[in-house]
Image (cartoon, rainbow, N blue to C red):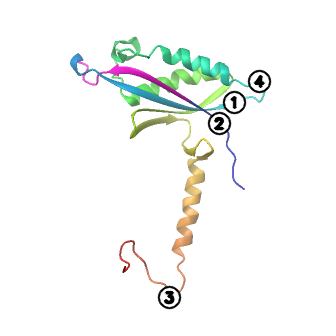
């Protein structure tokens, strides 16, 4: 029997600038940051998505169109994806709690090819098929075991060595 998972996925984007070389403000550059958050309800009563949408809009509005390095929270911390992700995750965890939800994970990216992920557990897949890390490991173990048992008389096949 497959374990069933349900979660809300919220997406937010905001435009901001940051500088990785704190001592040289001329290296300030802009990004469109994308933030995705998985959250689960702590109780079944009353849908909370509208209040979460309002809460997220208010939270991320303070980052829209500014230089992140000038914010007090980034005075002593360089606003890298990792640092931003950790700060957002910590602050949003308590905000989701106030709305009756638990923030499971947060991912943040500033380009199409890289995303930083932080959370209480690794979720793999899409919003329609969330899997915990252990479920994926169990599946991979079963697949490896299946292929370790080769039928008698069948030699090892290597990718790319077949004759065309």
Q: State how far apart marks 2 and 3 are (Cα).
A: 48 Å
Residue at the spot of label 3? 153
Q: Quadrant of the C terminus?
A: bottom left
Q: State how far apart marks 3 and 4 are (Cα).
A: 62 Å
Q: Quadrant of residue 19?
A: top left
Is 56 drawn above or below residue 44 in the view shown?
above
Q: Earlier in the sequence, mark 2 or mark 3?
A: 2
Counting from the top left corner in percent of width and height, residue 128 is at: 63, 44
Q: Residue at x 75, y 28 (%)?
A: 43
Q: Pointer 1: residues within 10 angstroms few (<14), some, or many (20+)?
A: many
Q: Which mark is residue 41?
A: 1
User: Magenta span covers which residues?
Assistant: 11-24
Q: Earlier in the sequence, mark 3 or mark 4?
A: 4
Q: Which mark is residue 46?
A: 4
Residue at the spot of label 2? 7
Q: Count up the numbered dots.
A: 4
Q: Pointer 4: residues within 10 angstroms few (<14), some, or many (20+)?
A: few
Is 56 drawn above or below residue 119 in the view shown?
above
Q: Pointer 2: residues within 10 angstroms few (<14), some, or many (20+)?
A: some
Counting from the top left corner in percent of width and height, residue 41 is at: 69, 30
């Amino acid at each position: 029997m497959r374990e069933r998972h349900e979660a809300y996925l919220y997406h937010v984007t905001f435009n901001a600038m940051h500088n990785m070389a704190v001592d040289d403000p001329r290296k300030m550059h802009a990004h469109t940051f994308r933030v995705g958050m998985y959250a689960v309800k702590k109780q079944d009563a009353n849908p909370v998505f509208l209040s979460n949408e309002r809460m997220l809009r208010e939270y991320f509005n303070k980052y829209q169109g500014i230089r992140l390095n000038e914010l007090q929270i980034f005075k002593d911390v360089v606003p890298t994806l990792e640092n931003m992700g950790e700060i957002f995750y910590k602050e949003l965890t308590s905000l989701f709690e106030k709305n009756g939800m638990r923030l499971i994970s947060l991912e943040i990216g500033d380009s199409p090819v890289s995303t930083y992920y932080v959370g209480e557990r690794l979720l793999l897949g899409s919003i329609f098929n969330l899997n915990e890390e252990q479920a994926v490991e169990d599946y991979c173990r079963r697949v490896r075991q299946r292929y370790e048992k080769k039928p008698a008389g069948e030699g090892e096949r290597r990718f790319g060595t077949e004759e065309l």
